[in-house]
Amino acid sequence: MKFSQSAQNALALSKNYAEKFKCRYTGTEHLLLGLVESDDEFLEQTFNRLKVDTNHLRDVVSSICQLEENNKLFKVDSGPNFTPRVLRIIEFAKGLAERLNKNTVDVIHLFLSLLYENDGVATSILTEYGLNFDNVKLAIQQELGDLEKENPSIITSTIPESLEPYFIDLTHQAATNELQSTFSRDAEFEKIYLVLGKKHNTNIIITGEPGVGKQSVVYELARRITKRLTPIHLQNKKILELKLKTLIGGTKYRGDFESRMDTLQEFLKKNSDVILFINDIALITRIDGTSNIEEYFSELFSRDDINFIGTCTSDDYKKYIDDIATISSKFENIVVRQTSFKETKHIMYSMIPTYEKFHDVKFDKEVVDDIVNLSSRYITDKSQPSCSLDLLDECGSYIKNQTGNTSEQLVQLQQKIDSLKLQKLKAVEDHDFELGLKLKKRETTVSNKLKKELDKRKQEEFVKVISKDTVRHILSTKTGIPVTDIKGGSLPDLTKVEKLIKDKYVSQFKAIDSILYHFKRVKTGLQDPNRPLGSFLFVGPTGVGKTYLCELISEHFFYNRQNFLKIDMSEFMEQHSVSKLIGSPPGYVGYGDRSLLCDYIKNNPYSCLLYTSPSPRDRG
């Protein structure tokens, strides 16, 4: 396939720009510059149709290339070569032109292929301008013909009309950037490729704790299939998500469900390129009222020409699937563990543009590092990367709400417009048209004033940046831990605290000094973060103030006298009484009910616990 003169000029310009910026290779950013500078008439019309300022785009790409100059200093005699990604883009452009029955590869084919690659510096820049393969394809579809022939994974799948409500085409969503695949787990994907390449037992069940990203693994697989980053035997596969509840729902008459399952079986037998994804696959064994669903799926699971991928939590797998040999023996269990600190940071960096665009805010890299550190330490009831992403999202929402409130003046103007509209309608109903015209003029005047105020407010908008203080404030509201302690290094005035305690707690200066010495060491960071802040044994006769001293510690070091739980250990003399603290074991009365100690610590992680009269516990 030959290249048109304008396409050749664009490729030559991209190499010239790479050489100009002293880069070792010609990347997607240089290719984008070459395409913009090629002065292709059709590409310019496309940019104008999509309201993209090409001059501004050219300046942005050039500035990014200049930033990369210091990192890619290199001198070669033959000029910079194309990166593997650019070579893939060129090859895809050839195939695209061929499928569209074009004799030559033109600039617009290269530009579409650049967008379809959906990776690299250039795609990130174009995304900021609201450009993606889908909207550009729609903008030029009439000019180039049917673009959906370029890749079967982008067209509407050949799902029977009767089954369409029960499927979600994940491969199509990945091709059109509708899925958020946040990370790549190389070790897990090696196992996935290995299982899907086998002759027998090619089904996979992905297990793990909630929040570790089990579904994201499937979404990432769909993205890799779309980008042809998988082994050859998987590149023509299509991932369809089965909506199990929808498949079962509405089958009130005998034979309805069986009819649907028969249609599903016929479809899967005829389409061996389909990988069927079932989220919460343990639901198959839990659904009541459909007794034969397990048998139907067991038959499908036993077929080697059909691939299944299921996800469920580790607890559900052990409880509902592991004991059923007809299902568990047909699946390879791949455990997804929560991400490490480094992996979580990588995920956060990849997701920053999405959250910045949604919340209209700016995240600094230092803030992202802080979010990962603090969420790992203080949010213990969720797994990474879910807890870090939730905290990132909440910070963006908080800033958006703080800066996006409508001013009182704008509210008053809008209320006045609404009032004038009602008066105008009443005047028309009363046939008082003269008054109606006056009210209409007043309404127009107030509306113009409101529009000016909105335009003025829009011009005065500034970039909203998420600070570390914002992160600590949100984390404090989520966990109940004071902001001052989260900041670390914001020590209370220990001299003042010492004076306040000694004024209230008389004559026990040695005990107070020992406690203060310990908290000085804790507050300076010389304490294991995985252990309690301190464990003290107060010994003395009744009435000397042991409990009162604990209350003072809670007040001055935990910032609230209410963050204090007193447990009388004399109530736990019998062996079975420990269930009051930590809950009953499985099989006993009270299992699953609230427990005094565990629930309190979960809801009040930053608090002081007092065990009184501990000796009876030892005898018990």
Image (tube, rainbow, N blue to C red):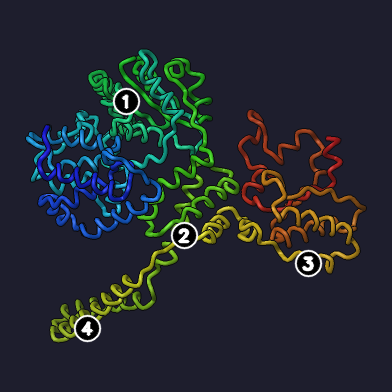
Q: Pointer 4 and pointer 1: residues touching (CB < 8 Å)? A: no
Figure quadrant of the C terminus:
top right
Q: Position of residue 262 (x, y in %)?
A: 27, 20
Vertical comparison of 322 with 130: above or below: above
Quick check: can you spot residue 115? yes
Count of numbered labels shown in the rendering = 4
**Which residue is labeled 4 in the image?**
442
Real-space Cα distance between discs 3 and 4?
66 Å
- Mark toward the start of the polypeptide (3 vs 4): 4
**Mark 4 falls on what kind of element?**
helix
Q: Reading the chain from its start, which is encountered first: label 1 or label 3?
A: 1
* Residue type highlighted by circle 4: Arg
Identified at 28% across, 73% down, the residue is 455
CA distance for labels 3 and 2: 34 Å
User: Of callouts 3 and 2, which one flags the residue occurring earlier in the amino acid sequence?
Assistant: 2
Q: From this view, report whether residue 240 is shown above or below residue 107.
A: above
Q: Which residue is mark 2?
A: 466
> Label 4 vs label 2: CA separation?
42 Å
**Amino acid type, callout 1:** Ile
81 or 382: nearer the eye?
A: 81
User: Badge 3 is on which residue?
Assistant: 495
Residue 552, above or below 264: below
How many residues crowd around disc 1 within 10 Å: few (fewer than 14), some, or many (20 or more)?
many
| Residue 428 percent across, percent down from the top left | 15, 79
